[in-house]
Image: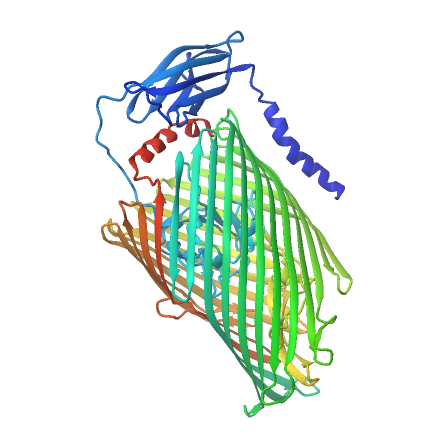
Amino acid sequence: MNTKLYPFLLFLFLTPHLLPAQNQPPASGSVAGTVVQGTSNAPVGFANVVLLTTQDSSLVTGATSDIEGRFVLERVPYGRFILRVSLVGYPSRFVPNINVTAANPQINLSQVVMKASATKLSEVQVTTERQLVEYNLDKKVVNVSKDIAAQSGSVAEVMQNIPSVTVDIDGNVSMRGSSNVTILVDGKRTALSNLSLDQIPANQIESIELITNPSSKYDPEGTSGIINLVLKKEKKPGINGSASVTAGTFDNYNASLFLNYRYDKWSLTGGYDFRQRKRPGSRNSFTTNYYRDESGLQVDSISYRRQESDRNSSDVSHNFRFGADYYLTPRHTLSASALYRPGTDKDTESILYRFLNEQEQLTSTRYRYTSEREDEKAMDLTLGYRQTFDRKGQELTADLVYTTNVDDEESNYRQEYGVSDDLPLLQNTLTDDANRRFTARADFVRPISEDSRLEAGYRSTFERLDEDSRFFDYNYDIGNYVYNTDQSNHFVYDEQVHALYANYSNKFKSISYQFGVRAEQTLTTSDQRTQDQVYHNNYFSLFPTLFITNDFDKDNKLQFSYSRRINRPRSRFLNPFVDLSDPYDVDYGNPRLNPEFINSLELGYLHYWGNSSFNFTTFFRRTNDQIQRYRVSNTVLDAEGQPVTRTETTFINLSSNASYGVELALTQAFTKWWRMNASASGFKTDLNDIQGGTELSRSQFSWDAKLTTTATIWKNMDIQLSAFYRAPMATIQGRMEQMFSTDLGVKKDVLNKKATVSLRVSDIFNTRQFRFVSSSPDFRSENEFRRQSRIIYLGFTYRINSDNNPRNKKQQDAQQEGPDEEMGY
C-alpha cells in the first residue's frame, strides 16, 4: 500500500477513539425498575423513562421500557435525581430522591406504578398531505410513496415523473441532458448503485433526493449531480412492515416483504424482494456508407445496410437485505447492514442484415442469432458508528463499506449466409466480470455558534474492475471450439481515491452562506493484460463549492451555488474489448480516456403559498474533456475473407462542452382532492472538438416537460395521470430524437387502510421508443430501439402493524417522546 495513505487511514481509525476519550463520563451507576399498571399490576411496555436533575430538571439520561415493562438507565453520574415515567393515556409519574452514590451505585426501584387517566380526551388528528415532489433550493425530494408507480414499478418508472430527469428505454438516467449521474443509496455507493434503475423495485424506496449542485461533503463524481435513493426505515417500536405482490402482462411479477423490529436498544430491519421481468423488443437501423476516391474529397460510391432485429430478455432477481442498529449508550450507536442480490438474465436476439448496392438493390443477406446468459451476484457489507455530544448538532460518524459485483456471462452466436450453402459461423464468448470496492470514511460536524458550524471529513476508496473475456470460434475440421487470441481480452482497472474536505457555514441577518473545498488524490492503472499494455493516470484535484442563500421571508428564498465536479471514465468506457455480438455495429472502449472536469453554477428562486410552491432555476455548466460516444465507419474482412463495412463505436474526450438553461417547476393543490406537479426545462448544448483533422461542432436547444396530476375520486381511492415529453437532443455526431410517454394509475386503500390495491398501465399509447441519428463524412445511420413498454400491473400491498392500529399508534407516540428525540439516539 502506498505510504502516502497512512496519514489518511490513521485519521479514520483513531478519530472515533480519540474523540470519545475527551468526553469520558465520571464514575457512574445505574437505575433499574419495572413499570406496571396500577389496577392489574400488568407490565407497561414502551413507556418513556427519563432521569432529571433536581436543580433545573434538565435531562440526564433516558430509555424506553421493554415489552415486560423493564428498564435500565446506565452510566448515571453520582448525584440526586428525579425519575419521570410517561406514556400516552397515563398521567406522568415522578419518583423523587433517586440518590446514586459510590456506596450505592446501583438503584433498583422494583415497581413503578402507573395509574390510567380518569378522563379520556377525544382524539384530534391534524394531517397535511405530503407532496409527490418537495422543492428545496439545494435539492428536490420525491416522496416515492405518493407515486402510484411505486406500488408496482421500478425506480426508473418513478424517475419519469421527476423534474430535470429523463429515462431512456433501457432505464438509464440523465439530468439536464447529461447521462453522467452518480447514484447513491442512503448516501453511499453500494451494489444497488451499480444496477440500472429499472432493476430496483420502487417499493423499497422511501424517497429520492436530486442534488444538482452538491457541497464538498459529497463525492464530486458525476457531471450533472447526485441521485440519492433513501431506503425505507421504520422507527416504530415492535414489529411492523409491509408485504406486497404484483403481476403484470408479459409475465412480469414482483413480490416483496419488509419487516422492522425495534426493541430496547436494538433496531432490526430485514427484507426480501423477488422480480421477474420480461421485455420483448426490437431494433431497426439503416446505414449509408460513403466510399471516397483517392483524393478523399468526393464520393466514389455508396452502399446501404438495413438491419432488423427482435430481442427477448428475461431477468429474474432476488434481493435479501438485513440491517441492525445497536444503541451502546444514548450517544453511541453501532450499525451494520448487508445486502445480497443473486440474479439471472437471459437474452435471445435474431438479426437480419440486408446489404444493398448504390441503386438500393439487394446484394446479399446475413442472419445472426445470439443467446446470452448472465449469472450475477452482488453484495454489500456496511459497518457504521455514530456519536453525538453535549453540544447540540455536534456529531461524529464513520463507515466501512465493502461492495462486490460478480458476473459470469456466456454468449453463443450463429451466423448464416442467406442462400449460401456454407456452414454457419459459430462463436462463443465467456466473460467473467468482477467489481470490488472498499470505502472507509469519517465525517465530523461541530456547531460553533447558533448560526455557524464547521464540517470536516475524510474518505478513501479502493476499487478493482476485472473483466476477462474469452472468445472461441467453432472449427468444423476438429469438431470443437478454438480459442481466438485476436478477439479475447483480459482487462483490469484499479482506482484509488483519497479525499479530505472541509465546509464552513454561517448566517448574517437573512443571508446564509457556506463555502468549502475538497482535495482528492486519484491513482489509476489500466492493465490490458492480453496485450501486456499498462496505462497509469495519477492526478490531484481541488473541488471548491460555494452557496449563498437569502431568505427574504418564510415563503421566498433565493440561492446561488457553485461547484466543481469530476466524471471519471468507467470500465466500459476504458475496456478495449471489441463486442462482436453485432459484427456490423461493434463497440469497444478507450483505455487512454481522461476524466472530465465540470464547473457548475446555479441560481434558484423558491416561492411558497399555502400548499403550493413555485421553483425557478437557471444553470450554466462548462465541461472540459467531456466523454462522448464517437462512431466511425471501417472496412474489415468478414469470416469468409470478404471486405465488409461496419460501424464502430468508441469513446473520446471532447475539448469542450457548454450547457445552460432554465427550469420551472410548480406544485399546485387546486382543491383538497386534486393536486398537480408540473415542470419544464429548456437548455442549450454547445459541443466542440477536432478529430483526425476534422472539426466537430454541434449546437442545439432542447427542452422537456412533465406533468403528474393526482385526484382522490372516491373515498381512499386515488387516480394518477403522468406524462412527459423530451424534445430532440444534440450529440457530437447527430441527435437523439423526441420521446413521449403517458402512464395511468389507480390505487385504493382497503381493510381499514391496512392494505392497498393498485392498477397501473405504463405507456398507455405505446409511444415510448428511443431513436437517434448519427453521421460523419463516411456514413449516416438512423436507429430505432423499442421495448415492450405498455404493460398492465395489478398489485396488492398489506401493511403489518400499520399506524391505524390503535395499540401500535399508542406505542409509536410513546416512542417519539422517548430518548430518540431528547437525546439524539
Q: Position of residue 712 (x, y in %)?
A: 25, 53
Q: Splitting the image into 4 quarters, where does residue 416 fall?
A: bottom right
Evaluate whether residue 586 shows in this view: yes
Q: Residue at x 40, y 44 (%)?
A: 557
Q: Position of residue 735 (x, y in %)?
A: 51, 71
Q: Residue at x 47, y 20 (%)?
A: 73
Q: Nearer the viewer, residue 269 or 399?
A: 269
Q: Residue at x 50, y 54 (%)?
A: 318
Q: Position of residue 50 (x, y in %)?
A: 41, 21
Which residue is the extreme one toward the front?
Answer: 479
Q: Position of residue 556 (x, y in %)?
A: 37, 44
Evaluate whether residue 236 shows in this view: no
Q: Decide: is 545 above or below 40.
A: below
Q: Nearer the viewer, residue 180 or 482?
A: 482
Q: Nearer the viewer, residue 682 or 584?
A: 584
Q: Nearer the viewer, residue 521 or 297?
A: 521
Q: Is residue 314 left or right of residue 467?
A: left
Q: Residue at x 39, y 70 (%)?
A: 767
Q: Splitting the image into 4 quarters, where does residue 294 fall?
A: bottom right
Which residue is the extreme one toward the top?
Answer: 103
Q: Is residue 16 left or right of residue 113?
A: right
Q: Decide: is 61 above or below 811.
A: above
Quadrant where the N terminus sits is top right
